[in-house]
Amino acid sequence: MSDWNTRTKLIHEGIRRSQYGEMAEAIFLTQGFVYDSAEQAQARFVKVGDDEFIYARYGNPTTRMFEDRMAAIEGTEDAFATASGMAAVNGALFSILKAGDHVVAARALFGSCLYVLELLGRFGVEVTLVDGLSLDQWRAVVRPGTRAVFFESVSNPTLEVIDIRAVAEIAHAAGALVIVDNVFATPVFSRAVDQGADVVVYSTTKHIDGGGRALGGVVCGTREYIRGPLETYMKHTGGAMSPFHAWIMLNGMQTLDLRVRAQTANAEALARALDGHPKVARVIYPGLDSHPQHALAIAQMGAGGTMVSAEITGGQEAAFRFLNALQIVKISNNLGDAKSIVTHPATTTHQRLPQDQKDLLGITPGLVRISLGIEDGRDLVADVLAALDAV
Ligand SMILES: *Cc1c(COP(=O)(O)O)cnc(C)c1O
């Protein structure tokens, strides 16, 4: 692996060129591979070499380019590409857990991640949820026999920042594997492994594609874990990424650093414009001094990120009026897209949660989540301020 900086790696790392010497990443849209002889087929099923493939559910040259590039920017030995972010979360956990194991997870999680944890419970894995911000709670429940801890480094939608280093220290003392969902932090701002994570998962559907085109996910970790339990689990349960989607991700990644920095500049500008606005009860942005984990966010990520959440005064009715008045910012539920997107979590992404859970997580009727795109920040701020006038 090279010692290039991220922006260079995003362009050049992982490329495998065919005999034609094509400049752009080629798409190998093939499920299977032809062997020169029966003996070669037999040998490959005994041991797959570094540049050899058997079946696209196990691996494919285009998918491997994407995996190598992800491992390079994440600073891990290896990576495995999955059909979606949820396939990555599912695989990261299910591949190593068995009945009787114990898992500790932060409570503020993406809804589908909570479902996966519920599912583990059905198979005899004991799951304990904690307030991820409280190191005392982590300390109180992590014990010998805790096989893994799992959390989002920046939570959705309330943008709480969890101290990866501190939680990893507690987990490692008990011998637990630290699995971090790093979607909101992005690989541009956070190298979670440098802070103690053992396994990092991304939904590549978000910033890595960056155009809202293709579902995808990736699990990054040691070679022993990725080509051991994780690959075995993924290849037999069918969660591999399609080579076509890997090709889309490879293209998207070339501009990842540029986009995420432009998105973050827009997020900072918007957070400042909303701070103290009479129709906004609270702005949540890790890059603002007022954020409860501002110092940690800067230490861990170096920036506030691409997402801004805000509590609109006047509850759901006011929030809906705000959403409906936006012109540039689109109502949707993806994030990390080049296009700016607004979400009302209480009635969409987190609708399923019972009220007491919503209260606990701070998902109030007036809360809106904005994923900043790469449009001109002045237009975005003007769009949001005009929509607030309509509230
Ligand atoms: C979107 C998301 C997921 C799930 O990813 P998909 O690609 O939609 O399956 C998991 N975790 C977080 C934090 C996400 O934002």
Image (cartoon, rainbow, N blue to C red):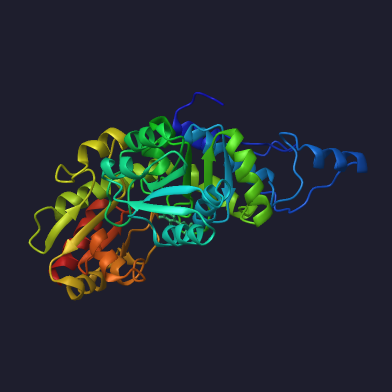
Image side of residue 163 versus residue 243, left or right? left
Residue lying at 39% horizontally and 39% vertically, measured from the top left: 188
Spot occupied by residue 350 in the image (x, y as percentages of width and height): 34, 66
Residue lying at 50% horizontally and 52% vertically, measured from the top left: 89
- State whether residue 11 is above or below residue 358: above
**Residue 64 appears in view:** yes
Quadrant of the rendered structure where residue 13 is?
top right
Image side of residue 241 versus residue 343, left or right? right
Spot occupied by residue 312 in the image (x, y as percentages of width and height): 16, 65
- State whether residue 351 is above or below residue 54: below
Q: Residue furthest bottom?
A: 317
Can you tell me which quadrant of the image ligand 1 is in? Answer: bottom left
Q: Which of these two is toward me, 115 or 53?
A: 115
Spot occupied by residue 123 in the image (x, y as percentages of width and height): 54, 59
Spot occupied by residue 251 in the image (x, y as percentages of width and height): 53, 47
Q: Quadrant of the N terminus?
A: top right
Image side of residue 26 versus residue 108, left or right? right
**Residue 255 appears in view:** no
The mark tally for this picture is: 0
Q: Residue furthest right?
A: 38
Residue lying at 25% horizontally and 70% vertically, measured from the top left: 323
Q: Which of these two is toward me, 386 or 110?
A: 110
Q: Which of these two is toward me, 54 or 25?
A: 54
Q: Quadrant of the C terminus?
A: bottom left
